[in-house]
Amino acid sequence: MSAKITLRRVTASVALVALLAACASPVANGAFDEVADTTEQRIGKRPLWIKSEQEEQTVREALDRLLAKPLTADDAVQVALLNNRRLQAGFAELGIGAADLTSSWRPANPGFTYGRLRGGGETEIERAVTLDALSLLVLPISAGIESRRYERTKLNTATEVLSLAARTQRAWYEAVAAEQIAKYAVDVREAADAQAELARRMKQVGNFSMLAYAREQLFYADTTARVAKARMAATAARERLGRLMGLWGRDMAFKLPERLPDIPKQPRDIENIEAKAIAERLDVRMAKANAEATRKANGLTQATRFVNVLETGLMRNSETGNKDKTGYEISIEVPIFDFGDAKATKAENLYMQSVNLLADTAINARSAAREAYTGYRTAYDLAQHYAFHIIPLRQKVSEEMVLRYNGMLISTFELLADARDQIADVSAALEAQRDFWIADTDLTFVTIAPVDASGSPSSLGMVAARSGAAGH
């Protein structure tokens, strides 16, 4: 019975090798198509793995078309997915993983030994062909483990793509808001300049005290400093967006809209956002795949813990004057000093580690979903509060102040003080509008992928995942 089972496993292994003996390149291309499909299903944008001059030309034409007009947030994301070079470097992980996967489908090469002895007028020749039978027997299991590890590599790559999309969209809102705030700061400085000139003239005719005059001059000086800071912030935000989109040279002259989109009339209401995050987030799926691959690896270790070497081979000896001798040899490691307990303990702990990491990933995903939704609603309420309550009231107050100034019921100093208050409220409203759209981006991506807003696009996560897989 045992011999029949062994024969079946060898037959299955050979059949698997025959079916799956493909080169790594088509495997990597198929994996990238899956990553691109995943990205397109979730955000409606598709990356491109540039591997030829023709594809590079296609990307160049797409960039020229997108950069010829003011970039929308969707356009910026599409440019990043096509042109970010670090992301392109990350796609190479698919090729590396495909090479490892293809190698796992192939058994170890057979060995050939040859020996020749001569003495006493006689010559003896030994020839043998050996094969690692153990690797052939466990080939289906090890190939399955590598397939699951490669699934994790694909999920990791898709996560990197979505993370870049989220960071680019956030950077777009920050860049547009920064330029809008910088333009408003310039308008404020021009108004402050006019106020300072008015204060100077009124002081000359004796209608303005030294204290009021100094306050207006201080206000003008302060607005000048604010303009410099706002321009610096706008430049930094634009450079950050350009880096994410992989732009340089003349492409950095890209145009942005003059203002942020209006706040929607109704906030989004996402039901069961925690369950949605658990079901769809790629990091949760990746942790599940990792735990499953580690469980299989643990099972393989338990099955082979006592046997590390099992080689079989055919032998043929030739000796002068005698008939050739044929036979076979079997080489097996005797488990006297190493019973495989250390290897089994390591495999068990790796499995428990992956299980706990899966639980931790799920907890973090649920928490991030709750936090994102709370942040979104708070940002929406604040933006609406500024847009429909504070700003209209501030305009009403300013109109009343002008009427009273024209009626000589208030002084010039009171009118100018009100103007400064209006500037502060408008700036706060712009920031609230920017924060809402950033919170909206976070809410969009929190259910599909982990997004580190402060991190930079990196393929280090992919490299770490590959290194971890190699350690099992």
Image: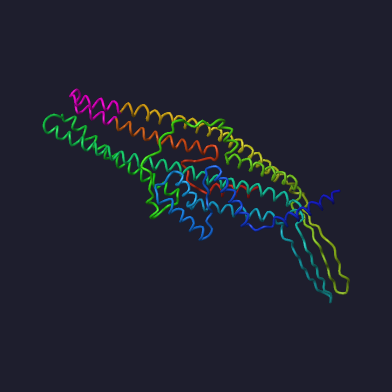
The number of callouts visible is: 0
Depth order, front residue of 287/110: 287
**On the image, which quarter does residue 296 sit in?**
top right
Front-most of residues 206 and 349? 206
Tell which residue pokes out farthest to the top in this image.
Answer: 409
Report the span colored magenta: 395-421
- Residue 223 percent coordinates (x, y): 27, 37
Looking at the image, which is closer to me, 285 or 385?
A: 385
The colour scheme is rainbow
Residue 338 appears left or right of 252: right
Q: Is residue 59 magenta?
A: no
Relative vertical location of residue 53 with respect to residue 82 in this rendering, above or below = below
Q: Quadrant of residue 387?
A: top left
**Compared with residue 120, is residue 150 higher up or lower down, i.e. above or below?**
above
- Residue at 21% over, 35% down: 195
Residue 322, x across and y down, in percent: 88, 72
- Magenta segment, prevailing SS (helix, strand or loop): helix
Residue at the far left in the pictured view: 205
Residue 139: percent from left, percent from top: 73, 52
Residue 403 at x, y percent in the picture = 22, 25
Q: Is residue 311 above or below residue 381?
A: below
